[in-house]
Image (cartoon, rainbow, N blue to C red):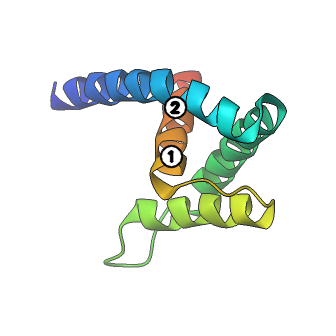
Amino acid sequence: MINEILELVFEALALVLAGFLVPYLKGKIGEAKYYRMLELIDIAVEASEQIYKTSPKGEPKNNNRYQYVYDLLELKGIKIKDEEIEALIESAVLRLNKALR
């Protein structure tokens, strides 16, 4: 029950953030680069799910995953604020989880 409530909260948060974030980022970095960035984030999230199925003892599992995505975007020359990247990562994780159901 609590998991379902948390999932709904995250879905609502992702929708709200996407509603503000998508137009802002499209204007800031251009539409083509925005869609390429989303594609890279989706790929990185899926890859990090496989690479970091488990984490070293005592380390939060998501730290490695976030860092993996940040590093990939940096490698590709995509520079946006950490908060924006985190919102896009959460959105990608939500899409991945829905696709796996």
* Secondary element at image label 1: helix
* Residue type, label 2: Leu
Tell whether label 1 touches label 2 (CB within 8 Å). yes
Compared with 82, 19 (above or below) is: above
Residue placed most toward the observer, 73 or 6? 73
Of labels 2 and 1, earlier in sequence is 2
Give the residue at the far front of this rendering. Answer: 27
Q: Is residue 96 visible?
A: no
Name the image quarter holding residue 35: top right
- Percent across and percent down for residue 99 are 59, 23
Figure quadrant of the N terminus: top left
Give the residue at the far bottom of this rendering. Answer: 57
Compared with 100, 40 (above or below) is: below
- Percent across and percent down for residue 7 are 31, 28
Residue 84: image tag: 1
Q: Is residue 15 visible?
A: yes
- Percent across and percent down for residue 91 are 51, 33
* Residue type, label 1: Glu
Compared with 56, 40 (above or below) is: above
